[in-house]
Image: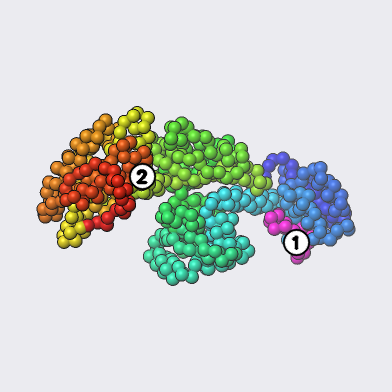
Amino acid sequence: MSDLPVRILLLDQDAAAARLIQEAFADARDNVFRVRRVGRLEDALELLDGEAYGAILIGKTLVDADAADALDRLAAAAPDALILAPGMAGVPLAVPYDVEDRFVTDQPDVRCLPQILPYLMRQAATAVALRKSEARFRAMSDASPLGIFVADADGGCVYANAGYESISGLEFEQIRGTSWTASIHPDDRHRVLSAWHAAGKNDESFRLECRFQRWSDSGVVWVRLNSAAISEGPAPSGHVLTVEDITDRKSMEIGLHETREDLFEQRERARVTLDSIGDAVLTTDLHGRITYLNRTAEAMTGWSREEAEGRPLAEVFRIIDGNTGETAADPARLAIEEDRTMGLSADCVLIRRDGEEVPIEDSVAPIHDRAGRVSGAVIVFHDVTQSRAMILRMAHLARHDALTGLPNRVFLSERLSQAIGLARRHRKQVGLLYLDLDHFKPVNDSQGHAIGDELLKSVATRLLGCVRGTDTVCRQGGDEFVILLTEIEHRKDAAQVAEKCLAVLSAPYKTRGREVSITPSIGISVYPDDGGDAETVLQKADAAMLEVKAGGRNSYAFYKARIAGEPARRQPAARG
């Protein structure tokens, strides 16, 4: 307790009884108590409106209010004071839960009050501090996009954050006392429970993807679970479950995590929960100083929690724009100033303590205190190196042939249109060679598709050696290839490339110990003589190739207009 005098308000109509209490405090050692008595509740409320008291003592006799009403109104008027009712044992308290711990209704000897009052006041202050700590944890957990579910030793829910309520479609009063397994989709129940029991039996971590059945709208949510035991003794006293909605990110194979950790102690509860998730989490105070990093954040930033604490965010969480290399805006400051959740800037790159660059993404949200005021920010992020590489790979596959790695017909169409545009501006020509392998189907059928695939890859390699770096070799499909020659001066330039292709492709191939021979038929068209757009030039080259096929194969020919009209565009032949 403070060395300052403790101000006590005594509320009792009985003057004699009140005098005994006043005398007991007057005789107290160090004389640290100052007692003021009133006889009516209204008088007490009037005093409390302008003065602060550390404790309020209620005697046996109240004239203008019943006991429960007095406690209720005093609690509202003096939210920080200890309310002691030594003359009211057994009286039910009709007071709000969040101030209940400030009331004591036992009947101690009034002579003992000076000795026990300091202890009771410290006990009440501790209870209030604990509730504020719980409020901070709830604010942090509710700011997280993850659902958090804490169960006791019997598996019944004792705590669930807003994220879990949103994912499950249930309110906390519906969740309290139930098991999280009730939300598992029926089709996944056997698999999930088997894995859950196996992990518990072998004392192993449990991570799994499954579906949750939402009770509010019967919808299905894909989640990633992570579970950990809460240990407060020799045996687990419960478990904590984190639930991440991965419905929109299922294709990215973001796994399911479930952890078991100790969450009953407030600080331990936050640490274990945040250390169990796969995402990195860090928090700041209102001034942008680091207050917390979870283990993943430590690994990704290269800073330990102890080293980072108290440092400016920009020193630990160094982020730049991946496109420009310029320092990115402070996400925590923006979230605090605007008091809203927001995503990190696009193409955000984290600079680790050792200088390594890691692409990241996710979100930042403000943290609020119990009064709703912004008190800091929480940043949740994860490494997207693999996912971005997958996106680039998918983009490549969409424009390239899977077997040979050559550009496909989509890529060729873009390149051909660009080449024609450049040739038009520079007054140049564009050559297009349409190649079809002669008698490829018999080779493919007789020696197998594996030999055929190897042959096609060898043809692609040889064709690349026949052209300039500015030209494009494309696999059109099956055993057909197209060569785009950009900005040529004369038609003979295309003929020279065709002759080179005939010579190179006609040489025997050795594939898996076998020697195979193959020849090409090549049709040539030239922009602008044979057409003014990509589609026409390609059709003319295809038509010229068909003429070579009809005339004996293993040769090349330029497109020639025919009086009878143009042949219909032939679809690419199937392999062989």
Classify mark 1: residues with Cα within 10 Å, few (<14), some (14-19) or many (20+). Answer: some
Q: Residue at x 84, y 50 (%)?
A: 44
The residues colored magenta run 85-105
Of the pair 274 and 254, the residue shown nearer to us = 254
Of the pair 428 and 215, the residue shown nearer to us = 428
Of the pair 533 and 337, the residue shown nearer to us = 533
Please provide percent x and percent y for residue 128. Answer: 66, 51
Is residue 465 shown to the viewer in this render? no
Q: Are marks 2 and 1 in contact (CB under 8 Å)?
A: no
Q: Is residue 138 left or right of residue 445?
A: right
Q: CA distance from mark 2 to mark 1?
A: 87 Å
Give the number of the disc on residue 93: 1
Tell me, yes or no, whether the highlighted magenta stretch contains residue 90.
yes
Tally the numbered discs: 2
Task: In the displayed orientation, state which residue is furthest to the top.
Answer: 426
Give the number of the disc on residue 535: 2
Q: Residue at x 30, y 46 (%)?
A: 563
Judged from the image, the secondary structure of the residue bearing numbered disc 1 is loop
Q: Is residue 126 left or right of residue 75?
A: left
Vertical arrangement, residue 490 with respect to residue 299, above or below? above
Please provide percent x and percent y for residue 202. Answer: 38, 65
